Amino acid sequence: MDPINLHQIAVEAMRSRGLLPAFAPQALREAEAARRAGPERNGSITDLRHLTWFSIDNDDTRDLDQLSVAEPLPDGTTRLLVAVADVDAMVQPGGAIDGHAGVNTTSVYTAAGVFPMLPEMLSTDLTSLHEGEDRLAVVVDMVVQADGTVTRSDVYRAAVLNRAKLTYNGVSAWLDGVAPAPPQVDSVPGLADQLRWHDALAGQLRQLRQARGALNVKTVAARPVFEGGQLVDLRPDEKNRAKDLIADLMIAANAATARFLQHKGFPSLRRFLKAPRRWDRIVALAAGHGVQLPAAPDALALDGFLRARRLADPDGFADLSLAVVKMLGSGEYAAAPAGAAGLAHFGLAVNDYAHSTAPNRRFPDLVTQRLLKAALADEAPPYSVEALTEIARHCTVQEDNASKVERQVLKAAGAYLMHERIGETFDAIVTGAAAKGTFVRIGRPLLEGRVVRGFEGLDVGDNLRVKLVAVDAAQSFIDFERA
């Protein structure tokens, strides 16, 4: 099989789902004009460049959205500051860049590369919180009790300086005691203490949420591996201690942001996850392990079951997590009127939750940032509830379309990798069972395909052996039959 053009497949997949694969010339001209003009600096900006800010992200990430710094206080509490890139300072509402971002609503991360929501001149440069660069940010300043309760929070604009760009794998290996410290730990005074404080603080925040029913799942995503420009494998990209650390801090910051807007009497965009419609299947999965869950959705009971299974079968926990996550479904966006409480997020066990910490790559976060800055400047909200309702609907739709594009390109890559393995059998888990088809995921390489024969009676979470019967990279088809 000839090498495939994954980029072209991705472009066509985006167009077919109403996503823009390239920026209009006017958007690129706006980015260049923003580079020359620099960020707007209206209003009060606190200088916090002296603090030991740092970032943790993937090894190859260039669009750095947030930094953090912690400070233990004498009364046993901890002050946590999360700085979010001030993207709004460089992206004018109503312009061509804003229009592109408003259509796509998210960066699209495919096996063919990234299709950024904002021009790279901004997202990976001028609005990215790069190490050693002065940047403007919106800071969420919180006080966290020893039990993980956030008892005080504030939001304000600030100037910040990233002292160390760290990676998930490097930090996690050091915290786990299996690798030496990242080089910046020796060169940046106080960084080692920062990482230890962050790790402890994340544990406190997580423990409180889990006591309220936050789900303790283990998710695995496929990461394309290239050698010499050619795709050679799809390997698991698993969660680790540092990824959990950052996730816990961002959840706290997002919740504090929602409370701030509510307190200011502003409307907002909220992120929520409904109670699962297929709770009956989750109950059946638990029953297969000898555990009886309540008949009605109960996050606390579900998390208790998941924690027990993680201890009892750590090797099989990823597959169980995958099945549960599929049954939970996807989160959605909704508009909340001024001062209104938000909808609950079933998986995170939080209410009043607003995405705010990734404005370089998520449009709802940019919208939230504009609301925050208007509130800080004592201005009227820049969006009405009606406008936010339409944005929420569109963002939910486009997030789903982006996920479909990512899966399609990944399947095209997988089909190319598997074209010489027709007839081989694999261990698999059912990831989807509906009228449109039954789908399974295999582990090596990590990819999904459709069961075209022998799918009768299968449901999400079932384990089975499948035989590869056909692939078509151009059409993103990977077909199995029950072995």
Image (tube, rainbow, N blue to C red):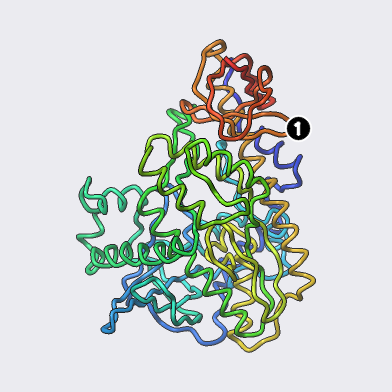
In the drawing, does residue 294 fall left or right of residue 456?
left
Residue 381 drawn above or below residue 194: below
The residue positioned 38% from the left and 35% from the top of the image is 315
Residue 319: x, y in percent?
Answer: 48, 36
Where 227 sits versus 194, above or below?
above
Location of residue 438 by image quarter: top right
> Residue 433, can we see it?
yes
- Residue in the image at 47% along x and 75% along y: 139
Q: Position of residue 227 (x, y in %)?
A: 43, 28
Near-viewer residue (292 or 329): 292
**Local SS, label 1:** loop
Closer to the camera in the image, 318 or 337:
318
- Using the image as rendered, state which of residue 360 and residue 278 is in the foreground: 278
From the viewer's perspective, is 336 left or right of 309?
Answer: right
- Left or right: 148, with 33 as reference point: left
**Is residue 376 shown left or right of residue 232?**
right
Q: Nearer the viewer, residue 423 or 1?
A: 423
Q: Which residue is mark 1?
A: 435
User: Residue 426: percent from the left, percent from the top?
Assistant: 50, 19
Q: Is residue 11 above or below residue 275?
A: above
Q: Amino acid at mark 1?
A: Ala
